[in-house]
């Protein structure tokens, strides 16, 4: 269980009714990089709180587990996650701009630290905003701060970093609303690869949110996490209860 919870957090912490999907469009070869970036950032997320009920599936080379997750976001301040197996709460996580914390009940362990744990594992600097962006379907990094190579691949806009860097990134956008469809982070020297896909989106309160998130991380072994948003609500009065039970043992994650 500890490995499952750790991986779920390390890889950015990630119903049967038909999904509401947003129409997409093919990319145009003549579109400039600045238009793609500006179009992506026009998709604002203007809310105070977001409540997500989700299904998730974790799989590595040795095991596969399905779980439920309640994800509560107080914009720019708190990301709170309650992980349940068969309806029974098994772990909680609390992420703030300064701290990453979680505890799990199987082994009675907990972790408290900064974002260096996540950053070291993925080989790229992470912070609260980047983790929040993942759940919202936004590009992890601020695209306005770097130079990008642009091309059209598989009818999507592709922005990629220069090839002569150790940590390379790629972002793929559809052509109608410049919604992010895929992003990858690769660190050649450490043989690390992270891929995040957003197969489809829905529109609520004039905001686009993912229907699902597919995450694949590779470093010596492969881990996949598939998250499906079952229900989302905005601007409710939410609580974020988090307290490590007495008797739990602190763990370190390298």
Image (cartoon, grey):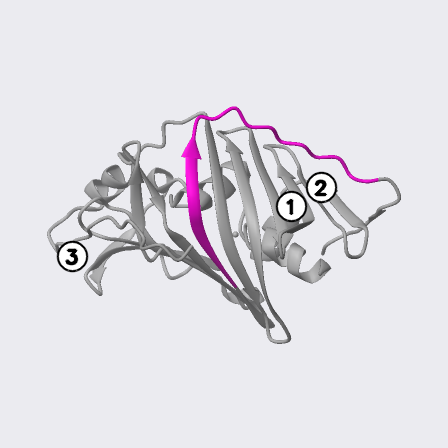
Query: Where does residue 159 sit, x and y in percent of width and height?
Result: 29, 53
Up-down relation of residue 202 to residue 224 (above or below) = above
Task: Return the mark for residue 113.
Answer: 2
Up-down relation of residue 134 to residue 4 (above or below) = above
Q: Residues within 10 Å of mark 1 (few under 14, many from 20)?
A: some
Whether residue 126 can be seen here? no
- Whether residue 84 is in magenta: the answer is no
Q: How crowded is mark 3: few (under 14 residues within 10 Å), some or many (20 or more)?
A: some
- In front of the other: label 1 or label 3? 3
Q: Give the range drawn in magenta.
A: 225-245
SS for tag 3? Answer: loop
SS for tag 1? Answer: helix
Q: Considering only order in the chain, which callout, 3 or 1, is on the residue closer to the N terminus?
A: 3
**Farthest-out residue, right:** 247
- In front of the other: label 2 or label 1? 2
Give the residue drawn at x 69%, y 48%: 91
How many labels, in total? 3
Give the residue drawn at x 40%, y 54%: 212
Give the residue drawn at x 62%, y 44%: 82
Whole-angstrom CA distance, mark 2 to mark 1, is: 8 Å
Quarter of the image where one finds residue 240: top right
Task: Return the mark for residue 249.
Answer: none
Q: Name the residue under label 1.
A: 116
Query: Where does residue 175 sit, x and y in percent of width and height?
Result: 18, 50
Quadrant that contains the N terminus: bottom right
Q: Mark 3 points at which residue?
A: 26
Left or right: 79, with 210 as reference point: right
Up-down relation of residue 50 to residue 32 (above or below) = above
Whether residue 202 can be seen here? yes
Give the residue drawn at x 42%, y 54%: 15
State yes or no: discs 1 and 3 in contact (Cβ < 8 Å). Answer: no
Whole-angstrom CA distance, mark 1 to mark 3, is: 38 Å
């Amino acid at each position: 269980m500890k490995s499952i919870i750790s991986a779920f957090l390390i890889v950015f912490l990630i119903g049967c009714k038909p999904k509401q999907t947003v129409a997409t469009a093919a990319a145009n070869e003549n579109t400039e990089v600045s238009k793609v970036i500006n179009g992506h950032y026009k998709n604002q997320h203007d809310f105070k709180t977001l409540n997500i009920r989700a299904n998730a599936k974790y799989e590595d080379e040795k095991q596969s587990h399905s779980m439920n997750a309640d994800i509560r976001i107080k914009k720019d301040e708190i990301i709170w996650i309650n992980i349940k197996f068969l309806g029974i709460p098994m772990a909680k996580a609390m992420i703030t701009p300064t701290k990453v914390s979680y505890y799990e009940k199987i082994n009675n362990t907990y972790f408290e630290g900064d974002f260096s744990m996540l950053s070291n594992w993925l080989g790229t600097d992470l912070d609260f905003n980047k983790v929040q962006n993942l759940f919202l379907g936004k590009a992890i990094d601020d695209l306005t701060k770097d130079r990008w190579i642009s091309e059209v691949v598989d009818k999507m806009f592709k922005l990629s970093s220069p090839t002569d860097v150790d940590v390379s990134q790629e972002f793929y956008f559809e052509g109608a609303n410049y919604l992010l469809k895929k992003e990858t982070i690769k660190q050649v020297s450490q043989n690390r690869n992270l891929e995040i896909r957003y197969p489809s989106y829905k529109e609520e309160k004039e905001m686009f949110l993912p229907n699902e998130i597919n995450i694949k991380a590779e470093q010596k072994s492969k881990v996949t996490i598939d998250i499906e948003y079952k229900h989302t609500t905005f601007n409710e009065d939410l609580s974020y209860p988090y307290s490590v039970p007495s008797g739990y043992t602190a763990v370190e994650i390298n």
